[in-house]
Amino acid sequence: MIKPYYQEKNITIYNGDCIEVMKTLPNDVIDLVVTSPPYNCGIKYDVYNDEIEWKKYHNWCKEWLKEIYRIMKDDARFCLIHYLSLGKSNKRHAPLMRLNTIAEDIGFKHHGLAVWWDITLSKFTAWGSWLSASAPYINSPFEGILILYKEKWKKNKEGKTQIEKEEFIESCSGIWKISPEKNREHPAPFPKKLASRCIKLLSYEEDLILDPFIGSGTTAVACKELNRKCIGIEI
């Protein structure tokens, strides 16, 4: 049994490999997953290599996706945050598209895709071949929120929802206008408002939320503020 690194009412954080920790959790307990895994784009973490061969990366993703699927309830949802496109001009990748395929092969069902504009990207003026069809560089300054579910999209029971009208309308539009996180103590943070939106839109109060790549704890903070239970894992 892996002991929690930190625990308080409704919040449990584990320090360890997410695959190994999730293996200790029972089937069918999670209501919603909100997470942003390492992007494999060379971010300088302290104990993780964020620049491995893509086939190896995809195989690793398959392993944690399998565990997430197992521990989700049949009406649970999954918000997976990743880049739509990244890489150098001669070697581009579409991570979220590939992860959608891997997830569907495991058994996840696809519901939709929301787009969050990440204005922290620095490469706004890389044109490639300027004013020429020779080799233009198509910039993609966006991240996507892939929204999956296990068996049923409609929740099995009613619960208390907190989302307000305007945020609900914007959320369902699929274009999420959310400012990036300003606190850069973690090398790759996402804003609390992004986690909060996923939680308010797709779960009820007192639901159990999982973030297997919880980083600096953003999802747990959002859960605490919104009266959700949370399990977080960080290596």
Image (cartoon, helix red, strand yellow):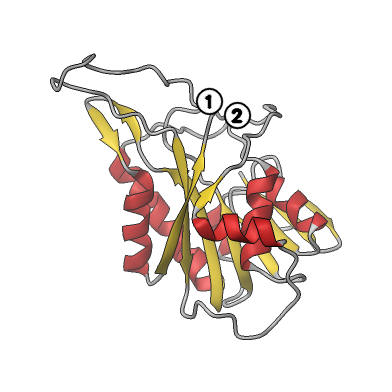
Numbered mark located on residue 223 in the image: none
State whether residue 211 appears in this view: yes
- Residue 94, compared with residue 147, is above or below; it is above
Looking at the image, which is closer to me, 165 or 109?
A: 165
Give the residue displayed 46% in from the left and 65% down from the top.
148
Q: Residue 207 at x, y = what percent? A: 71, 71
Disc 1, SS = loop
Q: Residue 144 at x, y = what percent? A: 46, 47
- Residue 148, compared with residue 153, is above or below; it is above
Q: Which residue is mark 2?
A: 187
Q: Outermost residue, right direction?
A: 9
Decide: marks 2, 1 in contact (CB < 8 A)? yes
Q: Which residue is mark 1?
A: 44
Q: Outermost residue, left direction?
A: 134
Looking at the image, which is closer to me, 84 or 42?
A: 84
Give the residue displayed 38% in from the left and 43% down from the top.
84
Q: Amino acid at mark 1?
A: Lys
- Residue 72, compared with residue 91, is above or below; it is below
For mark 2, does the 10 Å Cα neighbourhood hold few (<14), some (14 to 19), or many (20 or more) residues? few
Looking at the image, which is closer to me, 184 or 165?
A: 165
Q: Residue 234 at x, y = what percent? A: 63, 46
Q: Left or right of 153: which side holds 235?
A: right
Q: Earlier in the sequence, mark 2 or mark 1?
A: 1
Q: Amino acid at mark 2?
A: Pro
Q: Outermost residue, top direction?
A: 130
